[in-house]
Image (cartoon, rainbow, N blue to C red):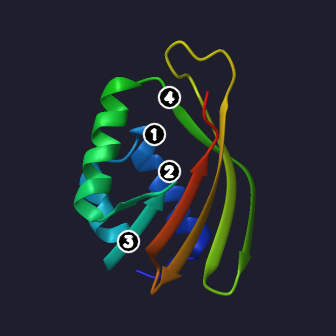
Amino acid sequence: MSRTPEQTWAAYLEVWNGSRPLTDLDALLADEYAGQVGSLPQDKAALRSRIDVYRTAHPTARFEVLDQFAAGDRLVTRLQVTGLSGQEHPLLGINVGLHRESRLAQEWAVWETH
């Protein structure tokens, strides 16, 4: 299936939001996926675990794209997450993704901390 980086990213956020199952990550992530959140590296297994823990801890959390632009095989997204327990204001973050063959191959994410 051929998807644009924007389509892949939208499906990826649906996994984070819980409207798609974790098993959909297999079709969205490249075999060599490598991520970095702040200074913490993660592989596919670590990402899957992180999403599962996050969805369990924050079942009402919702990720939303605020701005997005593409340059070649890279997609930059500014996003927010709302509905976090005990969090009055949205949490803001920026993600840079490298896409290969309709899949997310690498990503670098930075989120504000409170």
Cα separation, mark 2 vs mark 1, equals: 6 Å
- Is tag 3's residue or tag 2's residue first in the polypeptide sequence? 2
Q: Position of residue 109 (x, y in %)?
A: 55, 57
- SS category of the residue bearing label 2: helix
Q: Which residue is mark 2?
A: 13
- SS category of the residue bearing label 4: loop
User: Tag 1: residue type?
Assistant: Asn
Q: Which is more foreground, mark 3 or mark 4?
A: 3
Q: Which residue is mark 3?
A: 34
Residue at the (59%, 52%) spot, across then down = 110
Asked whether the residues under the numbered discs 2 and 1 touch, taking CB atoms below 8 Å apart as contact, a structural biologist would say yes
Q: Which residue is mark 1?
A: 17
Residue at the (30%, 28%) spot, across then down = 56
- Is tag 2's residue or tag 4's residue first in the polypeptide sequence? 2
Q: Which residue is mark 4?
A: 61
How many residues crowd mark 1 within 10 Å: few (<14), some (14–19), many (20+)? many
User: Tag 2: residue type?
Assistant: Leu
Q: Position of residue 101 (x, y in %)?
A: 45, 87
- SS category of the residue bearing label 3: strand
Q: Which mark is residue 81?
A: none
- SS category of the residue bearing label 1: helix
Give above or below for 44 relative to 80.
below
Asked whether the residues under the numbered discs 4 and 1 touch, taking CB atoms below 8 Å apart as contact, a structural biologist would say yes
Cα separation, mark 3 vs mark 1, equals: 21 Å
How many residues crowd mark 2 within 10 Å: few (<14), some (14–19), many (20+)? some
Residue at the (69%, 21%) spot, across then down = 89
